[in-house]
Image: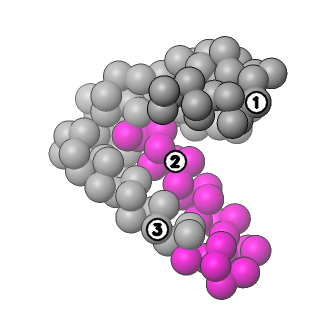
């Protein structure tokens, strides 16, 4: 099992636990909108570090982005397996073709 899959399992395990003892439970208890907001904040921080060119900070922020993405997905009952299935469906398709199919 990958680190990302283990993290997704941990996020799911925290659902419904005491928000006073788990940051993940606290975020999920605040609802999907707050989870999405937090994901957006982390994504912006990652973009800033990418522009600055600090590899270590970008790596740390990217980890935060992945964590908060998983929390946001969990808040909307979307699993990592579903996202992976969508990625597998797109495999072998040109990014330009895939984008045209979505936009067209």
According to the picture, the residue beneath numbered tag 3 turns out to be: 44
Q: Pointer 1: residues within 10 angstroms few (<14), some, or many (20+)? A: few
N-term-proximal mark, 2 vs 1: 2
Residue 92, x across and y down, in percent:
80, 21
Residue 94: which numbered mark, if any?
1
Residue 15, x across and y down, in percent:
33, 30
Q: Is residue 40 left or right of residue 19?
A: right
- In space, the residues marked 2 and 1 are separated at their CA atoms by 28 Å
According to the picture, the residue beneath numbered tag 2 turns out to be: 67
Which residue corresponds to the image point at 61% horizontal and 56% vertical from the top-left? 63
Residue 100, by quadrant, is top right
Q: Nearer the viewer, residue 23 or 102?
A: 102
Which residue corresponds to the image point at 56% horizontal and 48% vertical from the top-left? 66
Is 35 part of what is drawn in magenta?
no
N-term-proximal mark, 3 vs 2: 3
Image quarter of the N terminus: top right
In the rendered view, tell whether residue 30 sits above or below residue 82: below
- Is residue 51 visible to the viewer in this orientation of the structure? yes
Magenta span: predominant SS is helix
Q: Secondary structure at mark 1?
A: loop
Which residue corresponds to the image point at 27% horizontal and 29% vertical from the top-left? 16
């Amino acid at each position: 099992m990958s680190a990302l899959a283990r993290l997704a399992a941990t996020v799911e395990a925290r659902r419904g636990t005491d928000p006073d003892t788990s940051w993940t439970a606290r975020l999920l208890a605040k609802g999907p909108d707050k989870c999405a907001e937090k994901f957006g904040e982390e994504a912006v921080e990652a973009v800033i570090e990418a522009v600055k060119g600090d590899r270590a900070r970008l790596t740390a922020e990217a980890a935060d982005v992945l964590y908060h993405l998983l929390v946001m997905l969990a808040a909307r009952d979307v699993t990592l397996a579903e996202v992976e299935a969508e990625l597998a469906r797109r495999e072998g398709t040109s990014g330009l073709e895939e984008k045209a199919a979505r936009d067209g």
